[in-house]
Image (cartoon, rainbow, N blue to C red):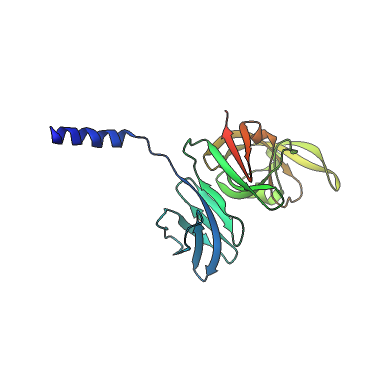
């Protein structure tokens, strides 16, 4: 009877669905081929490319000013000395948490058509918007889209309306998101309303939680 009861316990544990975890990770130092990471405010962790911390954060790439890490939900870039970045998937699997900078702006990392890119939340942008070089990295060809004209700080400029195959931010993955590719360069990808209209946004102090609606 004890053996049977123990087998039922094991079966029950194995039946529990596994969920990815999320963590706040900061790159606080680079020493040659080693990165020093702070994870959820804990003690510094020093690892080389290809290694994992005890918490499960893997160092994928490293440069003098940034690192690419992965906790099992896709690679994300973190800059040296920047505020901690929320990485990984929330328990629901369909939400993301962003942290505001000192000016109250929300930045984050996204995988766009499989390419890691930094973005700024911009509720004033009609669509996800990016410059020509970011579009090339994402495998976008402006000639495949519809040419439009947009108003910029420097006047009217050309842009092209296309659709992104995929955009993933932490646990949120969307397909067929409308985007604008600008003729010139943008300093950062703008996460506009073509994405934001499909999530619920909740401000919690210095954090913004995005939850996928459809």
Relative to 31, is 131 above or below? above
In this rendered view, identify the residue nearer to me: 89 or 70: 89
The answer to whether residue 146 of the structure is visible from this angle is yes
Residue 110 position within the rendered picture, expressed as x and y whole percent measured from the top left: 59, 45
Question: Which of the 4 image quadrants contains residue 150?
Answer: top right
Q: Relative to residue 173, is residue 153 drawn left or right?
A: right
Tell me: residue 14, above or below residue 36: above
* Outermost residue toward the top in this view: 214
**Left-right relation of 25 to 123:** left
Residue occupying image coordinates x 52% and y 54%? 25
Determine the residue located farthest toward the left in the rendered image: 1
Q: Is residue 2 left or right of residue 39?
A: left
Task: Assign the N terminus to one quadrant of the image.
Answer: top left
Name of the residue lying farthest toward the right: 155
- Image point (63%, 35%), residue name: 201
Q: Judge whether residue 112 can be spotted in this image.
A: no
Residue 212, x across and y down, in percent: 57, 32
User: Position of 18 compared to 40: left or right?
Assistant: left
Q: Position of residue 7 (x, y in %)?
A: 20, 35
**Quadrant where the C terminus lies?**
top right
Which residue is at 51% across, 56% downward? 41
Please tell me which residue lies in front, 141 or 173: 173
Measured as percent of width and height from the top left, residue 48 is found at 45, 65
Q: Nearer the viewer, residue 6 or 79?
A: 6
Question: Farthest residue in the front direction?
Answer: 205
């Amino acid at each position: 009877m004890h053996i049977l009861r123990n087998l039922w316990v094991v079966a029950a544990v194995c039946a529990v669905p596994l969920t990815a975890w999320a963590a706040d990770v900061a790159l606080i130092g680079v020493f040659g081929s080693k990165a020093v990471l702070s994870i959820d405010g804990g003690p510094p962790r020093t690892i080389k490319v290809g290694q994992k911390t005890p918490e499960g954060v893997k160092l994928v790439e490293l440069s003098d000013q940034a690192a690419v890490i992965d906790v099992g939900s896709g690679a994300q870039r973190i800059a040296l000395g920047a505020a901690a970045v929320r990485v990984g998937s929330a328990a629901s699997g369909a939400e993301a948490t962003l942290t505001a900078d000192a000016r109250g702006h929300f930045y984050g990392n996204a995988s766009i058509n499989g390419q890691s890119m930094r973005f700024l939340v911009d509720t004033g942008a009609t669509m996800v918007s990016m410059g020509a070089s970011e579009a090339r990295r994402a495998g976008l060809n402006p000639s495949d889209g519809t040419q439009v004209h947009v108003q910029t700080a420097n006047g009217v400029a050309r842009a092209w309306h296309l659709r992104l195959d995929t955009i993933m931010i932490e646990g949120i993955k969307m397909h067929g998101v409308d985007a604008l590719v600008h003729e010139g360069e943008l300093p950062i990808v703008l996460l506009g309303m073509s994405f934001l209209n499909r999530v619920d946004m909740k401000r919690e102090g210095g954090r913004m939680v995005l939850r996928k609606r459809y």
